[in-house]
Amino acid sequence: MSASAVTPLTAGEYLHISIATQQLTLWRNHRAQQQFPISSAARGCGQQRHSQCTPSGWHRIRIAIGANAPLNAVFVGRRCTGEIYTPTLRLQYPQRDWILTRILWLSGCEPGHNRYGAVDSLSRYIYIHGTPDEEPMMEPHSHGCIRMRNHDVIALFSQVSRGMGVYIDAG
C-alpha cells in the first residue's frame, strides 16, 4: 500500500466512492457516518484524458466551490453563472452537462495512475457535484464526474474540507 493510500485511512476520515454500488460513504473515526447515492461515468472507470471515464484510486479534495451558492445554482467553468436550474433552462441549453449547487474538485494522489500527464484527475476536471433532480442516481450516467442529488451534495459539502481523502473504488 502506498503512502498516499495509508494517510486517509490512518486519519480515519475520508470519502469512499463505490462504482459497483453507486454510493458515496463518508467515513469518520473509522466508522461509516453517511451514505449517499451517486452516478459515476456511463463509460465506466478509466484514467485517460478525454475518456469520459471516472478515474479510480486515491484522490484529495483540492478545491471546494460554491459554499454560498443557492440550491440549483448553475456552474460553467467552475463559476456560478447566476442562473438557477429549471427544466425550462434545460430546454434552452440542451447540450450542457449540468453542474449544480456545489463542486468538490478532485486531485489524484497516485503518480502515473491518476496524477500527472494524460491521467491527471485535476486537469481532467473531475468533480463531485450536484445534478438536476430528474437525472438518475445509482446508475452510471455522468461524463466522468461523480454526480449527486443537490440536497445531498450540500449536506456532504458542509462535512468535508480541502485535502480530505477520496477513494474511488473501481471494484
Image (cartoon, grey):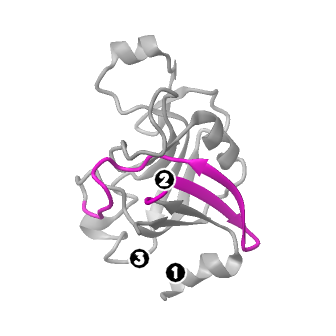
Residue 10 found in image quarter: bottom right
Q: Distance between the residues labelled 2 and 3?
A: 22 Å
Of the numbered discs 2 and 3, the one sitting upstream in the chain is 2
Give the residue number, with chain letter if any, for mark 1.
Answer: 4
Locate residue 84 relative to residue 91 in the image: left or right.
Answer: right
Locate residue 79 relative to residue 161 in the image: left or right.
Answer: left
Q: How far apart are marks 1 and 3 (CA)?
A: 7 Å
* Quarter occupied by the C terminus: bottom left
**Residue at horizontal 36%, vertical 77%?**
111
Residue 78 placement (x, y as % from top left):
46, 39
Asked if the residue at tag 3 contacts the one at tag 1, i.e. Cβ–Cβ closer than 8 Å, the answer is yes
Locate residue 168 relative to residue 115 in the image: left or right.
Answer: right
Asked if the residue at tag 3 contacts the one at tag 2, i.e. Cβ–Cβ closer than 8 Å, the answer is no
Instruction: Name the mark on residue 48.
Output: none
- Crowding at dot 2, Cα within 10 Å, few <14 / some 14-19 / many 20+, comes out as some
Give the residue number, with chain letter if any, for mark 3.
Answer: 110
- Crowding at dot 1, Cα within 10 Å, few <14 / some 14-19 / many 20+, comes out as some
**Residue 17 lies in the magenta stretch:** no
Q: Which amino acid is tagged 3?
A: Glu
**Residue 170 to residue 154: above or below:** below
Q: Which amino acid is tagged 2?
A: Gln
Of the numbered discs 1 and 3, the one sitting upstream in the chain is 1
Span colored in magenta: 19-48
- Crowding at dot 3, Cα within 10 Å, few <14 / some 14-19 / many 20+, comes out as some
Instruction: Name the mark on residue 22.
Output: 2
**Residue at horizontal 48%, vertical 46%?**
138
Locate residue 146 relative to residue 102 in the image: left or right.
Answer: left
Residue 28 placement (x, y as % from top left):
73, 67
**Residue 45 lies in the magenta stretch:** yes
